Every structure is written in structure tokens, then in C-alpha cells.
Image (tube, grey):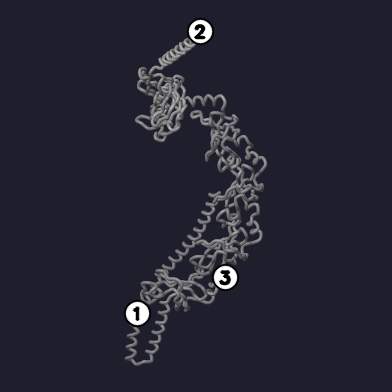
Amino acid sequence: MNEEKKNNNEEVKKDIAEENLEEMDMEKLYEESFRNLQPGSIVDGTVVKIKSNDVLIDVGYKAEGAVSKKEFDNPNEIEVGDKVRVLLQSVDASEGLISVSKRKADYVEKWENLKEAYNKNDSVDGYIKKRVKGGFIVSLGIPAFLPASHLDLKLVKNLNDYVGKKIKVKILKMNKSRKNIVVSRKEHLKEKKKKQKEKIDNKIYVGAVLKGRVKNLTDFGAFIDLGGVDGLLHINDISWKKVSHPSDILSEGEEVKVKVTYIEEESNKISLSLKELEENPWDKLEKDYSKGDIVEGKVISIVQYGAFVEIIPGVEGLAHISEMTWDQNINHPSEIIEEGEKIDVKILDMDVKNRKISLGIKQVKGDPWEKFVEDYSEGDVIEGEIKNITNFGAFVEVINGVEGLLHISDISWERIDKPEDVLQIGEDVKVKILNINEKERKIALGRKQLLEDPWDEMKDKYKVGDKVEVEVIKTTKNNAIVKMENGVQGFIAISQLDTDRVENVDDVVNVGDKIETKIIKINKKARKVDFSIKALQEEEEEKAIKKVKEEAKSGSKVQLKDKIKKQQEIDEEEKEDKEAVESEKNEEKDKEEEEEKEDKEAAESEENEEKDEEAEEEKEEKKDE
């Protein structure tokens, strides 16, 4: 019993001794392990507590280290149990306290990572924070300096455009003691360009057909990723058809097969084509169609000067507005056709080399000019509709699609200042065909030729010296233009308005006045007639004098003497008047010659204007074509 008790006591003592030894070993091991934690070393820690301003980090020592929340990038996202690497700043063994820093640990680790990239000549990511003198401050996790001369391969005009952009750079220099890093984007671009060239030389060449993926779409085309190298597929090279926007045919991410058409050696820019992998529709056009063929096409677009019509997929031709209808008064193609409409067209001309084709719509229906020439001759009378009125006349549609010119001089026997004073657009008018110019496809028409010519009556019924009543229809500075009852127009010169001198025509006559005059000149060839109020007054005065003389013969001597004296005075006045009349006649003759010259020049001017306008219209039509 005693022996058993003794054995138990010894076992208890042994257990206590082992426990004490274990505690001593643990403490010794703990202390030994912490001796390895030297100030300046980076250790792993665990977040054990989060306070209002600090975070407690357990690094395996007696006490935790406190780190300010400001040292964390996202302090609100910290959680207990998070692993954190910190730099051991100091150790107070007597107090069992340590000082740690996450920010310094981050700096050291980032520096080491950058140093490794520097030694391997690897590119690193960064972003440009701000402009400074001579360059930029670039954040690599650690601030670095980027000289402006190392921003790009070529000179950059506006450096501020790069602030805030993410870039890749090469590290040129690192100085830890000065905490100085110098980087270059230009060196990174050089290396990238070199690698691209190597890849292009090995795989990409003009004529190569490659698979690629649509990287992104723009208004002018699509960028195709050819496996690390981008090429441009221009909108004009997507399809033989007209493409409004690349998105009409392509989608981002879509896989496509393209042909390399051009490589710019200096910049390594690659041009691609999708349509060249398909049959050229212009080759098909040349093989299957000829000039003069009539084909069905679809109106793709309408412009002011015509319409583009697709006659086979990928081939569009221009139907000029002048080739759409035989009617010359069409203002816009949309008056007769619509986009999307299917129409028959005739191939007027083909230029496969320059990829141009001229089409005609009106030619499909036949030329109405040929029908007109076949059915009508000069001298025929025809009724047509007035389609347009100009300063020099009116255009009359004599048959559908064929118009003739009714010149202002052929509208009426009376003088006309403006065609619209007599005619209206849309009015039906009966005209006589005066001339047909088949070569120039022109028709001269006359309206007055179907009216009674008042000069026929003038030749037979009137002569110089006749008294006639006329109506004033217009006044000018030196003349009054008047019209006889039969419609014949003439002039009263200012010198013929009165026996007294007249300063202003309007002082004697006004438009609308009906006055008695005397015909003093008729020029049947020039179709001109001159009237005079003065001559009529002088004739009446002569009659009065003659009457006085007759009365004097039967009167007394005294009366006779007085009458003779009075007659002498009258004769003297008549002599003076006669001389004045002769002078005025000479003036009038000169004026008539001048007026005849002016009328001739005006007629020639009108004719020249008409020719100039017609030539200008033809020139404009050719220009539009």
C-alpha cells in the first residue's frame, strides 16, 4: 500500500517536471524564433482586431503591431483574419512591443518587383498622374519620372492629352538611396514595334489570306486582330456593294477571313480586304453585259443630279437626271423614281477600268423626237402646253417629251416687254412650226403667224398725211409709244408733241390718253410708223391762214392793207416755223436712224442672248453628266 502510494507520488513529480520543462522549452523556442525578426524585415501577419483608427496585426510575437488604417488602400474592406505583409520597424524586447508598417512593406516589395522587371528588361504597367517640368510623374505603385522625350516614338504636340492615361513603360534607371526611377514609353513602343515586325515578316505578307477576329468597329472601317497584330479593314474594302456602316455586315468578336492588300514598312500598318476574296462583279459585268443592253436594276440612292442604280450585286451605275425623261422640265429625280424601286435601264456607256457605268431611263421608252420628226413638218400648226416662261420666250411641249421655243418676237405682232404679260404656264396655245433643227434637236415656234397681221391693213388703208386716233400705251424720256385701233404701234417723238418746245413727254400726254395725230412716216419694211401732233396743229394753222387770205380779197383797202401786214407777219412766222420744222425733221431723221440702229442691235442682242442661254444650258447639262 505504502509502496503503491510512493510510486504514485513519483509519477506526479515526474509529470510536473515534464510540464515545467515543456513550458521552458516553448518560451525558449518562442524567444529563439523572434530573434529572426530583425528590424527592416518583412513578415506575414494576420488581422486580429479592427479599431476606429488602427488595425492590430499578429506577426507571431507576444504583442500585436498596430497599423494605421490610412496605410490601407481600402480601409473599409478590411476584415479580421485577412493576411497582411508588414515591415518590422522596431522591437522592444523588455516591454514586448513591436512597431510595424504596411505602407513601407508595400514600398519595399514594389521596389523589388520593379527591380526584377528592370533586370529582365520587362515592360511594366503604370498611369500618368501629372505634368511636371521636363516630363511626367508616372505611378508604378511607386512614383517614377517619364521624360517628355520618351513619351512616344515621334514628337507629341500636346503633352497634356496624355495625363491620366494608362501606359506601358520600360525602366531606364533605378536609384534606391535617392528613391529615383526613370522610365520610357518610347523604349516599350520600340520593342513592341520590333516584335510586330518579326511577326509580320514571318506570317503576314501582301496577298496572304488570314483568319482574324473583329476587334472594334468605326465609321470608316473595322480593326481586325490577326493574332496580336491589328489590321485595318476599310469600309470600301468590306464588300463590292455600297456599305453605309461596317456594322451593317460585321459584328465585334466575329471571326472573319481577310486578305492582306498592303503593308506600310515604316509604321507596320496593315491594310486588309474582305471583298477581294469574292468574285469581282465588274468582271462579271464585262463578261455578261454590253453597251446598249436593257437590264432591270434597283434604285439605291437619289441625288440632285441623278440616281444610282444597282444592275448586278456590287455594281452601281449613274442615271443622270438628263437621261431620265424626255421632258426637259424635271427639277429632281424623285419626281419620277423612288429609292428601292426596280426599274428598267439602258446601258449607255461602260468603263470597267475606272468602274463607271452610265445608264439611261428615258431610252428604254424610245425617243419622242424621232416620232415628232416623222409626224410633223415646218409650217404645220400644232397645239401644245406652255411648260416654262423665260425672259426671251416660252417653251411649249408640242408632243410628250418634245418642247419647242416660242420666241418673244413671235408671240404677237404687237410689241411685248415680257412673255408672261401675254402667256401663262400650263396654258394651251396653238402655234405654227417655223423651223425644225434635227441636228441640234431644236424647234422654233410662232404664235403671231396664226394671227391677222395689222400691217397688211396698213399697206392698203393708210398713207403719210392721214389723220388717225391713237392711244398712248407707254412713255419714255424722248418718245410716246402709241397704238392704233388695228394694233399697229408707233412713236411720237418729243419734238412732235407740240408746236411749242416740250421739256417732258408726260407734260403733254399720259398712258391711256387717246389723241388725234397725223402719220408723218411709214416704213413698211421695218414695220415702223411715226405720228405727230405738231404736224396736225401746223396743218390746221395753214388752213386758218388760207381762210384769212380769202376773206382779205373781198374786203376794203384799209382792211386789205391791215390783213396784208398781218399776213406778212404770219408768213414770217411760218417761215421761221418751216425752218424749225426742217431742223426738227433733220433731228427726227437722225433719231429715226439711231432708233433703227438701236432696234437692230436690240434684235441682235436678243438673238445672241437666246443663243448664249441655250449654249449655257447645254454646257450645264454636259457638266452634270
Q: Verify CB contact (< 8 Å) between mark 3 and mark 2.
A: no
Foreground pick, 455 / 513? 513
Provide the secondary structure element on which disc 3 rests. loop
Label 2: how many Cα within 10 Å (few below 14, some 14–19, many 20+) = few
Q: Which residue is mark 3?
A: 451
From the image, state whether disc 3 or disc 2 is nearer to you: 2
Provide the secondary structure element on which disc 1 rests. helix
Residue 577 vs residue 288: left or right?
Answer: left
Residue 138 vs residue 249: left or right?
Answer: left
State the separation of the CA atoms marked 1 and 3: 48 Å
x and y, in percent, of residue 374 in the image: 66, 59
From the image, state whether disc 2 or disc 1 is nearer to you: 2
Labels 2 and 1: the sequence-earlier one: 2
Q: Which residue is mark 1?
A: 573
Q: Which residue is mark 2?
A: 2
Label 1: how many Cα within 10 Å (few below 14, some 14–19, many 20+) = few
Q: Amino acid at mark 2?
A: Asn
Q: Which mark is residue 383?
A: none
From the image, state whether disc 1 or disc 3 is nearer to you: 3
Foreground pick, 432 / 47? 47
Q: Amino acid at mark 1?
A: Glu
